[in-house]
């Protein structure tokens, strides 16, 4: 199964690329440059070992585990908000949209981490560069997709938008899997890119109004495997809700 390297960019060019083409990919060092601190992936990664099962999968699968949390980023301030349900309209998620999905909260050891909060501020700056300085309503998801069922689907809803302003997808780990190719397409045209995120810390930034995205299924290699990601969405105007 052939894989393609991500089209990595200079971190200082991320905002201009987001504006010009709707997506930008960074390696770990690029993210750390923008955050202004090393990413403590060795400290964060064990949190993915304690993710509850996602009980809302409508395809009958058991391959996804996750946690979810919300906050509001205004300038350089991250404000925590009460834990709430995750909701998307059917127009953006035909498979799981239209229902309130209640997931376990993010662990306090993560949300109190100063680098975590600096990461959210950094993503808020990228969103402000696209839409203008304002509060952004943040939803963060910790995902583990495994091969318990023989195949795992990172995006069972298929190619989609999330109904937000900015999406960030960071790879934490890949273990004994093949596949999991990231695909990004212009929402209104045929142009697209495809690549595989393999190095921890690799991060894809998406202008959700401009592009659609998906990740292909993963298959096991030499025993059960998994793919761990952090997905953060930022939306102006408020959280999505019914």
Image: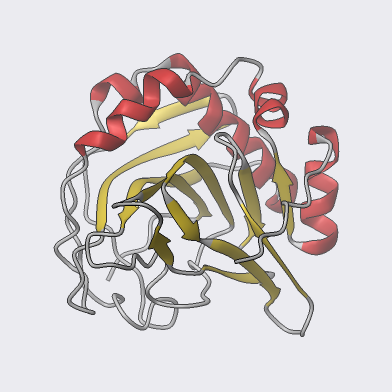
Q: Quadrant of residue 125?
A: top right
214 or 75: nearer the eye?
A: 214
> From the image, which quarter does the N terminus lie in?
bottom right
Q: Which residue is drawn at the image coordinates 19% and 51% (left, top)?
A: 103
Q: Quadrant of residue 83?
A: top left
Tell whether 223 sits left or right of 113. left
Tell whether 170 sits left or right of 193. left
Residue 32 horizontal/vertical position (percent): 65, 23
> From the image, which quarter does the C terminus lie in?
bottom left
Q: Quadrant of residue 56?
A: bottom left
Total number of numbered discs in the rendering: 0
Tell whether 88 sits left or right of 41. left
Residue 212 horizontal/vertical position (percent): 60, 72
In the rendered image, the vertical position of residue 49 relative to residue 18, given as above or below: above
Residue 123 horizontal/vertical position (percent): 60, 38
How was the colour assigned to the protein in this rendering? Answer: secondary structure
Tell whether 196 sits left or right of 96. right
Q: Which residue is drawn at the image coordinates 54% and 23% (left, top)?
A: 118
202 or 11: nearer the eye?
A: 202
Q: Which residue is drawn at the image coordinates 44% and 68% (left, top)?
A: 217
Residue 15 horizontal/vertical position (percent): 79, 44
Q: Which residue is drawn at the image coordinates 45% and 15% (left, top)?
A: 114
In the rendered image, the vertical position of residue 210 relative to residue 14, given as above or below: below
């Amino acid at each position: 199964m052939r894989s393609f390297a991500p089209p990595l960019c200079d971190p200082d060019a991320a905002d201009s690329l987001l504006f010009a083409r709707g997506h930008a990919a960074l390696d770990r060092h690029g993210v750390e440059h923008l955050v202004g601190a090393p990413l403590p992936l060795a400290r964060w990664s064990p949190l993915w070992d304690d993710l509850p099962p996602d009980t809302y999968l409508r395809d009958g699968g058991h391959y996804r585990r996750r946690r979810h949390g919300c906050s509001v980023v205004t300038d350089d301030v991250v404000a925590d908000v009460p834990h709430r349900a995750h909701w998307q309209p059917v127009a953006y998620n035909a498979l799981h949209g239209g229902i309130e999905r209640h997931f376990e909260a993010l662990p306090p050891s993560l949300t109190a981490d100063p680098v975590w909060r600096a990461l959210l501020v950094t993503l808020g700056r990228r969103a402000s560069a696209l839409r203008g300085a304002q509060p952004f309503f943040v939803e963060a998801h910790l995902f583990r997709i495994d091969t318990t069922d023989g195949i795992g689907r990172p995006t069972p809803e298929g190619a989609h938008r999330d109904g937000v302003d900015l999406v960030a997808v960071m790879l934490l780990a890949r273990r004994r899997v093949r596949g999991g190719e990231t695909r990004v397409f212009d929402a209104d045209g045929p142009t697209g890119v495809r690549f595989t995120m393999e190095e921890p810390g690799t991060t894809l930034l998406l202008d959700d109004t401009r592009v659609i995205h998906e990740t292909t299924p993963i298959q096991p290699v030499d025993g059960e495997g998994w793919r761990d990601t952090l997905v953060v969405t930022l939306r102006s105007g408020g959280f999505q809700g019914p």
